[in-house]
């Protein structure tokens, strides 16, 4: 009888762990890309002028010269070194590369510089959940 109780407890524990793992996986899968996107961004631009979560950047074309810079601000003119989120030289980018950030944004998402001929897709969300 004691062995049966032990095995029933082990099965229950395994099932609860599996359910928790599935729930976490679903949350992770949903958040990797966010629920909003800006596709084929090829120049400096305001992506979203309000607080959100920046989830990922996918490189469509790395470009030939310059840097990719994203800032936490509401205008391209407001971009500065004090609100830079990420800066990547074109030589470090490859087509198809995914840069997972998952960063809470206080003001907004702005692409302040783009490599010559570069293009990216950006995934973000207005909710962290």
Image: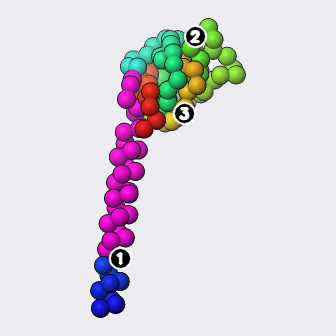
Expressed as whole percent of the image width and height from the top left, the position of residue 15 reads 32, 66
Q: Position of residue 23 (x, y in %)?
A: 36, 51
Choose mark 1 or mark 2, whichever is in front.
Answer: 1
Label 1 sits on a secondary structure element that is helix
Identify whether 128 is placed above or below 9.
Answer: above
* Prevailing secondary structure of the magenta residues: helix
Identify the image quadrant of residue 1.
bottom left
In what quadrant of the picture does the C terminus appear? top left
Q: Which numbered disc, 1 or 2, marks the residue that appears first in the sequence?
A: 1
State whether residue 116 appears in this view: no
Look at the numbered discs 2 and 3 and tell me whether their residues touch, using CB distance below 8 Å.
Answer: no
On the rendered structure, is 112 left or right of 62?
Answer: right
21 relative to 14, above or below: above
Quickly name the residue at label 1: 10
Task: Tell me the CA gap for discs 1 and 2.
Answer: 57 Å
Q: Which residue is mark 2?
A: 76
Task: Give the residue drawn at x 32%, y 84%.
Answer: 5
Instruction: Kindly identify the residue that appears in the image at 37 percent across and 39 percent down.
Output: 30
Q: Name the residue nearer the viewer: 53 or 1.
A: 1
Quarter assignment of residue 81: top right
Magenta segment boundaries in residue numbering: 10-37
* Neighbours of disc 3 within 10 Å: few (<14), some (14-19), many (20+): some
- Look at the picture and state if 55 lies above or below 17: above
The numbered dot on residue 126 is none
Question: Image check: 129 left or right of 15?
Answer: right
Report which residue position mark 3 lands on. 103
């Amino acid at each position: 009888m004691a062995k049966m109780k032990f095995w029933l407890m082990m099965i229950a524990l395994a099932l609860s762990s599996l359910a928790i793992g599935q729930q976490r996986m679903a949350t992770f899968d949903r958040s990797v890309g966010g629920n909003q996107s800006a596709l084929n961004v090829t120049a400096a631009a305001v992506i979203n002028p309000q607080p959100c979560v920046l989830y990922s950047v996918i490189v469509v074309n790395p470009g030939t010269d310059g840097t990719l810079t994203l800032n936490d601000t509401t205008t391209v003119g407001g971009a500065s070194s004090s609100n830079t989120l990420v800066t990547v030289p074109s030589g470090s980018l490859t087509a198809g590369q995914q840069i997972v950030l998952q960063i809470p944004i206080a003001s907004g998402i702005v692409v302040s510089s783009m490599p010559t001929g570069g293009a990216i897709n950006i995934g973000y969300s207005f909710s962290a959940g």
